[in-house]
Image (spheres, rainbow, N blue to C red):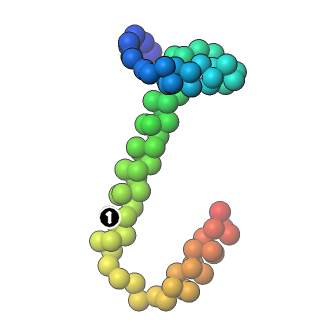
Amino acid sequence: MSMQRKTITITDQMETWVKTQVDSGKYGNDSEYFRDLVRRDQERREAETHLRYLLDEAESSGMSDRSPQEIWAEAETGLARN
């Protein structure tokens, strides 16, 4: 995988935060921290897109004839199987 160098400008407060994260030992350097932030942002946006898809699909399916209790019982049964 090829890498691209980026130059960013952050405030002193942000710099202190980044250094604290690196000093905690979770990240080896600033670049690792920023790559982790980008990965997390990608995952969050993908999850949002998937949730919007599910909500649109649910909305377009129409109203259910089942009671809330029936729907809840089916959800619990499905969770028990998994």
Give the image location of residue 47, x and y in percent: 44, 48
Q: Quadrant of the C terminus?
A: bottom right
* Image quarter of residue 4: top left
Q: Is residue 17 left or right of residue 53?
A: right
Q: Is residue 45 above or below residue 53?
A: above
Q: Residues within 10 Å of mark 1 (few under 14, many from 20)?
A: few
45 is higher (above) or lower (below) than 7:
below
Horizontal arrangement in the rendering, residue 18 relative to residue 10 (left or right): right
Name of the residue lying farthest toward the left:
60
Is 13 positioned to the left or the right of 52 in the image? right
> Residue 27 location, x and y as percent?
63, 21
Residue drawn at x 39%, y 17% as measured from the top left: 9
Would you place residue 22 above or below residue 82 in this image? above
Residue located at (56% from left, 25% from top) = 17
Q: Label 1: which residue?
A: 56
Q: Is residue 33 visible?
A: no
Residue nearer the viewer, 63 or 12: 12
Q: Secondary structure at mark 1?
A: helix
Image quadrant holding the N terminus, namely top left
Name the kind of residue labelled 1 in the image: Asp
Q: Quadrant of residue 26?
A: top right
The residue at 41%/44% (across/down) is 46
Q: Is residue 75 left or right of residue 11?
A: right
